[in-house]
Amino acid sequence: RVRMFFRLKIMEGVTFSTRMDALETAWGKDQQMFPVDSTPAFGGKTKDWNTPNLSFEQSWVDFKTGIGQFKVGYRSGTPYGWGTKFQNAPGTAPGISWGDTYGPVSVLVDLNKKGKGDMTVGTNGKSTPDLEQTDIDTDYYDVGVKYKFKGGEAGLLGTYFRDASARTHTGGTISSVYNMQPYAKMKFGPVDLEAETYWMKGQIASDVAGTADVD
């Protein structure tokens, strides 16, 4: 994979950044655009013009204020890059984050919307459309704190995930999950020690008759 960042300094304290990912496919596989769309206007190709071999993955604005630093746009999601490399993943999410530093203490608050869907409509063979889906968003919210000390640092991140993407007009499920991620990094002479815990608890609630909730 080739990953390129472009950062434009708009003015003092304000930057615009993008990230492009390339060469992410398996060597030798067909490089056609996907998924196939049957609409003739698009030549039988996808309406998303990113190919599997080149995509613009992130785009966000950083700006510093008197009350902290804000990041707005598509950028790396906080839970996927917190603490040590344990459980890290290249997740991208649109959202807004705020952070600030007070001496050795850094704080972070952000909200992210990985999926958005208020409703879709279909006729179902009728002359008037039916409401088929409502509230099928996927969101998560983070609150984190880090403390740096001589020879190391420690932190704790709390995340609330809410996933309603499985809902339909006939019922479905909503996942509500709480995640805690404490970590610590310490250095003793030539020895580095790291530790992180990933703990989750929640419920998949169902409103489908005969389907029980799952903890």
Image: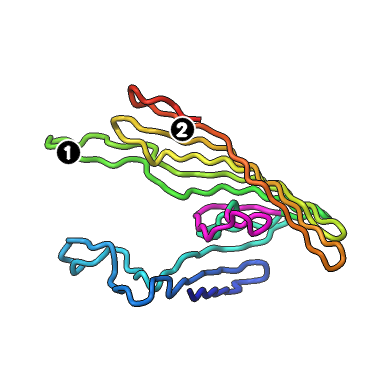
| SS for callout 1 | loop
Q: Specify the amino acid type for callout 1.
A: Thr
**Would residue 132 be found to the left or right of residue 12 on screen?**
left
Q: Earlier in the sequence, mark 2 or mark 1?
A: 1
- 186 vs 139: above or below: below
Q: Residues within 10 Å of mark 2 (few under 14, many from 20)?
A: some
The residue lying toward the viewer, choosing from 189 and 165, is 189
Bounds of the magenta span? 80-99
Q: Residue at x 63, y 71 (%)?
A: 11
Q: Quadrant of residue 89?
A: bottom right
Residue at the spot of label 2: 204
**How many numbered circles are shown?**
2
Q: Secondary structure at mark 2?
A: strand
Where does label 1 land, which residue? 123
Q: Position of residue 212 (x, y in %)?
A: 41, 25
What's the residue type where badge 2 is placed?
Answer: Ile
Question: Magenta stretch containing residue 89, yes or no?
Answer: yes
State the residue at coordinates (78%, 63%). Answer: 192
